[in-house]
Image (cartoon, grey):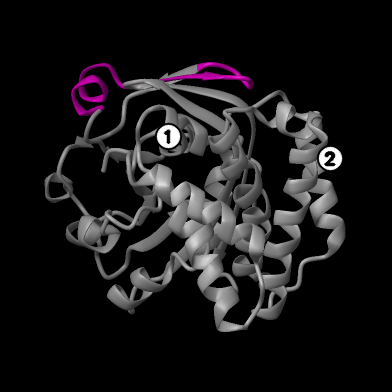
Amino acid sequence: MSITKRSKILIVGTGAVGGFYGGKLAEAGQDVSTLCRSDYEIVKSEGIKVKSCSGDFAYRPAQVVKYISDYRGCPDYVIVTLKSLPNIDVSELIGPAVAPSTSIVLIQNGIGIETVIRDNFPDNELVSGLAFICVSRIKAGEIHHQEYGRLVLGLYPNGASENVELLVELFINSGVHCTISHDVIRERWKKLLWNASFNTISVLTGADTKSILDNKYTAELVLKIMKEVQTVATVSGHDIESSVLQKYIDDTRKMKPYRTSMLLDYEAGKKMEIEAILGNTIAIAQKYSTQVTNLKCLYGLLMLINNNLNP
């Protein structure tokens, strides 16, 4: 497919992930706008700066809006990169900007996060996506891209479309390694192997990925958690080969020590994505009468911590 026109893209959630990928698309010539709240004044006046392992860059979004109703035009894609939190009503947030032809793209963590969007926008194309990237927000309008950057996109609940293929091509042209999955739910389960283990253990220990794997007992716990996620994925119809678990562990050993996004949220006093990552997984396990002792233990501990954090 050849790109014949600029696509209008609205990024909702211009933190680390949204700021980085929105910037790559903008640098490649796409019409990229951003919805910002806490960073609004800085991004409006100075744009977004990205310190990246693949080369620093900065950009100014086509539009910077504080309220979705202020966005002018009809976006081809609304890309949601917000944290998956129960107190954020994504459907209500993006509603005013969603036109009949708009594709809604969720680049978020967790499992089962698409259902509410599908129910509220049944006639819009829904794209589910996973970002495999080490990136963090340094301060307002500034992002640090430490490593990786791969994206996987797929039509929800399965398959692909011309719009998905075009978006993948836009990312590839911007220098992002992006691929299509025809079973994107399985890809979500695969990423959950990492998020349910490393993210959660990092919060409880304050440790980075290298420290977690260098400790015999936390390394063993990582594998136990991954195996529970693998089991739930399998009983729900999405088989994951055992070799994937070991590959994720091996790849994590090779990468630079990384303080996970959930740990950074905790240290900043922000609510963590424990429902999307753990709560939804446990609910699916219970539906299939599957035991997930380690996941329940982590969930209980993190619930107590989460209750004391800011909304």
Residue with the most extreme left position: 70
| SS at badge 2 | helix
Residue with the most extreme bottom position: 288
In the rendered structure, the answer to whether residue 176 lies left or right of residue 139 reads: right
- Mark number for residue 246? none
- The magenta segment is 39-56
Q: Where residue 43 sits: x, y (%)?
A: 26, 24
- For the C terminus, give its image quadrant: top left
Q: Is residue 127 visible?
A: yes
Q: Which residue is mark 2?
A: 250
In the rendered structure, the answer to whether residue 20 lies left or right of residue 209 reads: left
- For the N terminus, give its image quadrant: bottom right
- Among the 4 quarters of the image, the one containing residue 239: bottom right
Residue 200 in the magenta stretch? The answer is: no
Under mark 1, the amino acid is Asp
Under mark 2, the amino acid is Asp
Nearer-N-terminus badge (1/2): 2
- Number of labels in the image equals 2
Front-most of residues 7 and 57: 57
Q: Which residue is mark 1?
A: 265
Residue 52 in the magenta stretch? The answer is: yes
Tell me what residue is drawn at x 66 percent, y 77 percent.
290
